[in-house]
Image (tube, rainbow, N blue to C red):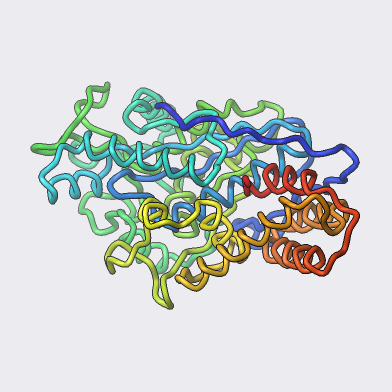
Amino acid sequence: MRSWPEVYIPSIDSRFDFPALSLFNSASQSVQQVPVQKQYRMYVCGITPYDSTHLGHAATYISFDLINRYLRATGNAVDYVQNITDIDDPLLERANRDGVDWQELAESQVDLFRNDMTALHVIPPKYYIGAVEAIPLVTRKIHELQSAESIYGVEEDLYFRVHADPDFGSRSHLSEEEQRKIFAERGGDPNRLGKEHPLDSLVWLSQRPDEPAWPSIYGQGRPGWHIECCAIALQYLEPDSSSEYLIDIQGGGSDLIFPHHEMSAAQAKVSTGRNFARMYVHTGMIGLDGQKMSKSLGNLKFVSSLINSGAHPMAIRCALLMQNYSRDRMWSDDLLEEASKFLDELILYLSQPDCAPTQEVIQAIVNALSSNLDTERVFSLLNQWIKDSRSGFLGGHPGELSRALDALLGIAI
């Protein structure tokens, strides 16, 4: 599937020191250092395209954009892959509700997502892969799991035995009671008759009446959710055979920790015999005016709507970066106004011929980002630089700081 346009990334002077990046690993429940290496493999779960890009989506992809930018700034390569779940129950349900063709709905929302990512200055993935185009990869992965004796049938559907992975549950740290509850809430079917274990996950859904399906050696049907990401990640990220881990970073929102990331990782482990990801990195949820933001409550804020109402895309980006990526946080009109004022002042002082010293602030920004993407510290540094420039401090180079903010934070001015 077509991604969005490439983003120009300015270079940063070699005199700046880049410490190794550390990130919070959900699997170890600790901040860990990402090993320094010449190439990184990062997979971030994409959207199910049945609605516009909301601020929760934007916060997630902007956060992983920072990781992508930081690792690239160290002079190393990042292979970044993202999927689109362009066939799934929520998409079909929305299309039926609105009386539209499900493919047209998916295509329209993917186009809108591309536009939003372009406006927000997010580096596109190297491969942007839809579930439909990945069906041959999914059936191949199912075959590998069958060879490992971890697949069984329920009527004409196929399921994966999650406990074929001896490490199942170790990445999400939930009791089985919690797992069952969350599984039921997030698309699972723990109570289906015929399953060997309530948590076993669907890998192939046989065709239902009036639903789309594709031919395969398993009959007409479509992929399960978790195996889609497993198959796409392992195909397009081309794991290094000498590494203990198949990929370096598995990312997404914290609502994907279980079941999605746990089950994808289990399928990868059983089919390859190797650990899926070195790091499981997750972003917090975005709320609105003190309340959880969700489709069910109907209180989503959409990126395209904010831009159409006059919000500067870089102000939206700044607002989403002002608090730590891994914490749940609130969106409000006041936050956007604060970010807009900050951006106006930043642009003002970056457009002056003279400004406060910049070399020290750039190095401090690099150090803050290396420490689990400490963007709160970054914005504190920038606000102090603005204050110093307003007070008449001199000796800086505005172009140097502007390029660094573009390269590291994606704030293009």
Q: Does the rendering let one see residue 168?
A: no
x, y (%) of residue 280? 59, 51
Q: Nearer the viewer, residue 134 or 144?
A: 134
Residue 403, quarter of the rendered image: top right
Task: Indicate whether 400 appears above or below 335.
Answer: above
Whether 260 is drawn above or below 159: the answer is: below
Left or right of 279? Residue 185 is left
Q: Is residue 328 visible?
A: yes
> For this rendering, which residue is in front, 194 or 335?
335
Residue drawn at (48%, 71%) of the image = 330
* Residue farthest along the bottom direction in this orientation: 290
Task: Give the quadrant of the N terminus.
Answer: top left
Q: Residue at x 17, y 45 (%)?
A: 95
Query: What count of labels does the image hold?
Result: 0
Q: Position of residue 142 (x, y in %)?
A: 38, 30
Question: Viewer-proximal residue, 133 or 18?
Answer: 18
Is residue 193 found left or right of 266 in the rendered image?
A: left
Q: Residue at x 90, y 54 (%)?
A: 395
Q: Position of residue 105 (x, y in %)?
A: 23, 40
**Residue pictured at 76% horizontal, 52% vertical:** 352
As drawn, which residue projects farthest toward the front?
Answer: 353
Residue 167 image position (x, y, % from top left): 55, 50
Occupied quadrant, residue 376:
bottom right
Residue in the foreground of this view, choosing between 413 and 246 = 413
